[in-house]
């Protein structure tokens, strides 16, 4: 773990020739090897090269050069520097904290170490989702999506954005706070909102019409008794269900994941009245109809394609399923 004392010296390399003073209040002093960092990335090569003041300072293992990095996070810089020097970070791997991974991703991106640490970051991202149980607070989903974006990992970006669509009901302006909004492309945020809204609309419109015979007179085919039964099945007070997050509402709003999981377990339901006076028939909403609808709903909530997002595609394109790069996710 990073130093617990303010300004504590952390010798990543005992005879390192550089001391990074990280954080506005010097949260940590990291002793590192300039040769290792210069080989790791062009950013470090420039920072520690002769063209920058920091690089022109005399430095040696006996008298390391002090370089201030006031804008960086101390723990993230320590994690990154340990990886770059061939060390492991057991607590990072064992804990898999989304905020820590996100801050590490910021540091890796800033210092252009994405390729050098590709396997390290891939292990962290995949490890997080392998252990994810759906009970983490919603901000972690956004942090992991932003981390996958910064680390250029298409598979976990798709997984994270899928969870954002299905497992959240907050307004995206609340989820994507200022410090993440400047990392995450606006078009991607808009596409996520459009995909979730479209899924909500499908639930509201099509579920009450499951199993209804088509009427040649274009009747609305709305049966109030079935709608009431849906409310009971899905444990909501009215139809369509509320999808809007309201911190005052003690019952909370529905999220798509809850609806999908609920539909997969529902048994057949027999309608009690004809769907309209023209058809005059009563049809059963079968168990398979509920499962098929749940599957279609899940399919409509696929995550975004990172390659398209990084390529600058518009929200209208991003919300469509990408078939060109499916091999990457």
Image (spheres, rainbow, N blue to C red):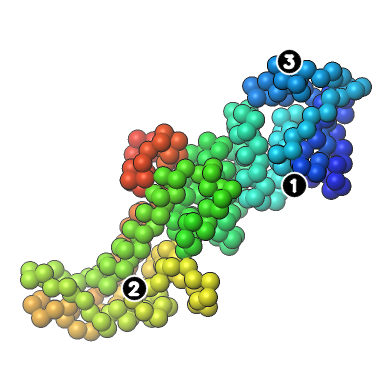
**Image position, residue 226 (x, y; %):** 28, 79
Residue 43 as seen in the image, left or right of residue 322:
right
Label 2: how many Cα within 10 Å (few below 14, some 14–19, many 20+): some
Instruction: Please report whichever mark, 1 or 3, sits nearer to the chain's N-terminal start.
Output: 3
**Image position, residue 70 (x, y; %):** 74, 38
Among all residues in the image, which is located at the extreme front? 53
Q: Which residue is drawn at 36% across and 79% down?
A: 238
Q: Please identify the quarter of the rendering in which residue 55 is found.
A: top right
Q: Please identify the quarter of the rendering in which residue 297 is found.
A: bottom left
Asked which secondary structure carries label 2, the reply is: loop
Q: Name the residue under label 1.
A: 91
Label 3: how many Cα within 10 Å (few below 14, some 14–19, many 20+): few
Q: The N terminus appears in which quarter of the rendering? A: top right
State the separation of the CA atoms marked 2 and 1.
45 Å
Instruction: Please tell me whether mark 2 or mark 1 is closer to you in this view.
Output: 2
Q: Please identify the quarter of the rendering in which residue 294 is found.
A: bottom left
Label 1: how many Cα within 10 Å (few below 14, some 14–19, many 20+): few
**Image position, residue 23 (x, y; %):** 76, 41
Q: Name the residue under label 2.
A: 240
* 85 over 206 or under it: above or below: above
Residue 41 as seen in the image, left or right of residue 146:
right
Asked which secondary structure carries label 3, the reply is: loop
Instruction: Please report whichever mark, 2 or 1, sits nearer to the chain's N-terminal start.
Output: 1
State the separation of the CA atoms marked 1 and 3.
36 Å
Figure label count: 3
Residue 329 as seen in the image, left or right of residue 127:
left
Q: Which of 216 and 269 is in front in this view?
A: 216
Instruction: Confirm or deny contact between disc 1 and disc 3 (CB under 8 A).
Output: no
Instruction: Please report whichever mark, 3 or 2, sits nearer to the chain's N-terminal start.
Output: 3
């Amino acid at each position: 773990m990073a130093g617990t004392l303010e300004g504590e010296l952390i010798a990543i390399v005992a005879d390192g020739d550089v001391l990074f003073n990280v954080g506005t209040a010097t949260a940590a002093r990291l002793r590192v090897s300039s040769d290792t960092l210069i080989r790791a990335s062009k950013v470090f090569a420039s920072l520690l090269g002769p063209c920058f003041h920091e690089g022109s300072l005399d430095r040696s293992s006996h008298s390391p050069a002090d370089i201030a990095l006031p804008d960086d996070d101390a723990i993230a810089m320590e994690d990154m520097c340990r990886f770059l020097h061939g060390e492991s970070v057991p607590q990072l791997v064992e804990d898999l904290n989304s905020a820590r991974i996100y801050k590490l991703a910021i540091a890796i991106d800033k210092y252009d170490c994405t390729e050098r640490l590709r396997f390290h970051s891939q292990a962290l991202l995949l490890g997080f989702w392998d252990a994810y149980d759906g009970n983490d607070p919603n901000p972690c989903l956004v942090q992991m999506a932003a981390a996958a974006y910064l680390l250029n990992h298409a598979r976990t970006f798709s997984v994270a954005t899928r969870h954002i669509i299905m497992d959240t009901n907050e307004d995206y302006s609340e989820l994507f706070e200022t410090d993440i909004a400047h990392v995450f492309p606006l078009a991607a945020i808009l596409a996520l909102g459009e995909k979730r809204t479209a899924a909500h609309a499908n639930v509201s419109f099509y579920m009450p019409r499951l199993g209804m015979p088509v009427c040649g007179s274009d009747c609305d085919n709305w049966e109030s008794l079935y709608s009431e039964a849906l409310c009971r099945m899905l444990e909501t007070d009215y139809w369509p269900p509320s999808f809007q997050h309201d911190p005052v509402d003690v019952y909370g709003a529905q999220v798509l994941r809850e609806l999908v999981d609920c539909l997969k377990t529902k048994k057949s339901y027999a309608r009690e009245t004809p769907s309209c006076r023209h058809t005059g028939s009563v049809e059963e909403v079968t168990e398979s109809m509920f499962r098929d609808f749940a599957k279609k709903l899940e399919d409509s909530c696929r995550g975004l394609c990172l390659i398209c997002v990084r390529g600058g595609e518009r929200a209208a394109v991003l919300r469509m399923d990408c078939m060109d790069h499916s091999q990457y996710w």
